[in-house]
Amino acid sequence: MKPTKHYLKTALLPVLLFLSANAYPVSISTYQYFVDGILDNTEVVLKDRVPILSWEYTATGTTYVSSFTLKVSLESALPFASPIWSVGLTTNSINTQNLGDNQFRTSINYNSDGLGAALLNDSTYYWDLMLYDSTESTVTIFAIGKFVTTTSNILFTGSAYELQIDYNNPFNPTAGQITKFRYKSKNLNERVKVRIFTLSGKFVKTLAEDQLALKEREYTVVWDGKNYNEEIVPSGIYLVNLAAGDSKGITKRVIVKNK
Amino acid sequence: MIKRTLTITLGTLLCFNCAQAGATLPGLDFLQISQGARATALGEAFTPLADDFNAVYHNPAGLGFIIRPEFQSTYTTLPGDMYMGSGGYLHPFPAGTLAIHTLSFGGTAITRIQDGALSDTFSPGSMASGLSFGFKVSDTFALGAAAKSVSDALDTDFKASLMLFDAGFLLRSKSESFSMGYCAQNLGTSEFSYSGSLVKVKTPLTHKFGFNFKADLPEQSSVINFIFQADKTEFQPVSYSAAIEHWGADILALRIGYKFLTDENSTKELDTLAGLRAGIGIHIRGIGVDYAYQPVATVGEVHRVSFVMKFVGWKVKPKYFDSFMKADPYIFSPNNDGMKDSTFFLPEVPQLTTLTLWKISIIDSNNIIVKTLSGQETLPKIINWDGKNDFGGFVSEGNYSAELYIEADGKRSQTEKAALNIDLTPAVLATSISNKTISPNSDGLEDDTTFYFTITDNNYIERWQVAIINSKGKTVKAFKSVDDSYGLTSINKELYWNGKDDVYGENVPNGDYKIQLTVYDVAGNKSSEDQYVTMFIPTKVEIREVVKEVVKKQEFQGLKISLSSEVLFDRGKKSMKPEAYTQLDKAIETLQTYPEYKVLIEGHTDISESKQNNVELSSSRAWNVYSYLVKKGIAKERLAVKGWGALKPIFPNTTRAGRMKNRRVEIVITKEKMALPVKSETATPETENTPQTQDNTPPAEEAQPQEAPKQAPSE
């Protein structure tokens, strides 16, 4: 520690104490909405589960975000005239994580109080979030969020992390068909890779590169049947692999039928 | 052949590498999954080795070298709940080895999902069954091919079946320390489509090329293979493999290999371990288990287990039988000199019932048959070849080989070629001699001579002989080679001769002798070279003999003592040698016996020098003898001196011996008596230079000197 810096700090300390005595309202500089860990998620699976709504923000100031209100509606414009779920909660260590560098993430399950209506498949929903700081005098209004629900028949039954092929298997990329890979880490937040290989182990394409998969969310990636060179791969059996951490992960077969 | 193949193969690899840009992936990827635990553990580099059943998957040419039947089955677990089973049987026949093999690929059932809706399950699966055949073209070269019926069922309504072919070659040195192989796989159809589909799929045309180096270390009970291979599948990047296999005591095999993909995307996306293959094998009495571990990209791991059974007790019965043929002598010289002009072939064959044909082909170093000897029904025990080609002319010098071919009992013979060498060049000789004249009288001067010679032959020397031959052509002394000279290509030797003959061990008579070296090389080619030596011993015995002889013949002049200049003088010198005095003292004795007769001292030379020189030399020498005689008390008045030069030769000057004899000093005791001062009146008229004819030896036999002059006038 340089002495000058030390003296400076010592000299400024009374000033800082004076400033902190006066409430300096929280300021939100960045914010993002996620459903199941994905921004503007269009693949929100509802089967046997509820989506997890979360938002991440950078907050500076002497006060902190102490509560929020959330409204979900089928309406695309504010203010929502008939929200299907409306909730107001205080932030706590259970629903909010300090990510460091003044970053915070708050997550709640949809309809956690059971007072809202059930979400419908294949529908587009909008959400409106408001944050309040600890003085409760300042209100920060956020822009509108959006997510799309989707039908899925697959089930996650494992205890750790899982990969399932959804939507189309086999599929025909020549006819414009796609397939979806859904994956989930049950207990841990994991960095994951989703890649496609040929049967003999040759690399085809990366679909998710070191993506952060938060626990209990369901993630979806779509494969259009093209390789890294954007060429449609020939008909055959391909391997889709979910690798989490150092593990070899999970490998499933996906069949391409070009017709 | 090897070079050309190499060029073509590398060229092909490079070409496909260039054409790769923008290409798509070929289908039927399951065909690119390595088969066999052993081959896989070796980094999938098995094309140049191909020495067991795995040859059917990596290079069918390798089957050609396999002589025992073999069974193999492999089970492979693959990521994605897949498995693969493969196996087959190979059987060697005299013409080559045939293998039948099948491969089945599948996995657990997959639940069909169509637009998110789950329905039935389906099981994609593939099969490839085929026949492979490999055969030897020569001891070191084999070709092979395979036909595979491939079917791929991706779905119940999405199937394809087609025929694909493999072809390869394998070059393997006789010692097996080096081999090189090439295989092209999935030939025959470049594209196909699945049922109900219009989309064409490319077949995975693959080229594989590699080298293997085998180190056989019997002391360590180890065999080590070092394998290098390059693989190129059309529209895919080249891959390179390197592997080491160590066999301990032919039981335990440890294998490690690495397959390196040159594609940027692959190297970036796959971890380094993805190229690794490793394995272990335990084989006892032909039965073995091999295991191979392979990490497949980051996707998972592949485990392969192969069960191998080699029928060690059984071996293909060849359509050939072993025979042997020797050529004796194998080096010979067909030049009609009576020495090794032909060779004999001695065939050794097993008991044959019916011989239909025998044939010996003599092949030159350019592999051209120069002569064929053949016959039917009976194979002679000895077959002679006179070195003539099929056109009746003699074949030229060089290396040849003779190959015996027999057809008998429906089989053919397999004979190692017998080496032949035709050598028409005799040994090259070089000779020299230390003393050209010898006088072995133990005076330490020129008592012996040394004969040096060098023999060099392009093959080797069989024997040599050195003969010392007298002027009548009779050998007086011979030296012969002993066993230690035999088989050498070069000999350096020196022989010492002291003038003794072989029969009596005595000095040979004076005269000229020829030293003749005669050499025979292994092919019977003779060469010889001569040197000459002169034997001359001027002993006292000889002088006396000479004196007597001369006296008898030189009647008209009187008694003559002839002294060789060789004894008296050094060559070309006037002054006398010390040993001359002994000889002269003997002459002086004779002179003193007849004090009343005049003495003539005559010097003679040969014609070697100019006339003037000869006269000068001869007179100088005569005067030197004169001086000595005077010094020894011979009255000056008795003596007269004359140098004749070469005017009076006693022998022809054409030979060495003749010339030597002509070089002499003669002391002649004339018939002319001294005019004694006392009885000058009586003596003077009697001094006539009349030759005495009747009495041959007057001075020696007549005791009274005075009687002789009395006789002289009477005649």
Image (spheres, rainbow, N blue to C red):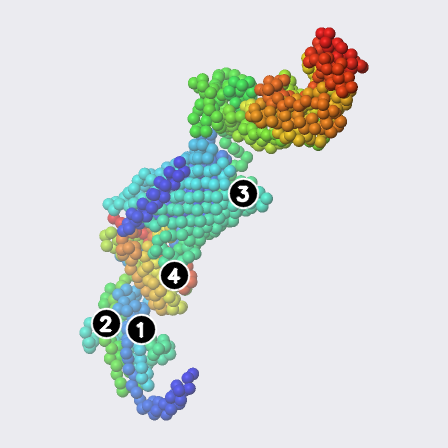
Which residue is disc 2 drawn over? A126
Tell me the distance, in whole angstroms, between the alpha carbons under discs 3 and 4: 44 Å
Q: Nearer the viewer, residue A206 or B152?
A: A206
Q: Residues within 10 Å of mark 4 (few under 14, many from 20)?
A: many
Does B130 appear above or below A7? above
Does A10 appear above or below B520? below
Q: Quadrant of the N terminus of chain B?
A: top left
Q: Amino acid at mark 3?
A: Asp
Asked whether, in this view, residue B1 is left or right of residue A39, the answer is: right
Tell me the distance, in whole angstroms, between the alpha carbons under discs 2 and 3: 76 Å
Q: Amino acid at mark 1?
A: Ser
Which residue is disc 3 drawn over? B216
Same chain for labels 2 and 1? Say yes or no: yes
* x then y, percent, for residue B609: 57, 26
Q: Residues within 10 Å of mark 3 (few under 14, many from 20)?
A: some
Q: Quadrant of the C terminus of chain B?
A: top right
Same chain for labels 1 and 4? Say yes or no: yes
Which residue is disc 4 drawn over? A243
Asked if residue B117 can be seen in this view, the reply is no
Foreground disc of the pair 1, 4: 4
Foreground disc of the pair 1, 3: 3
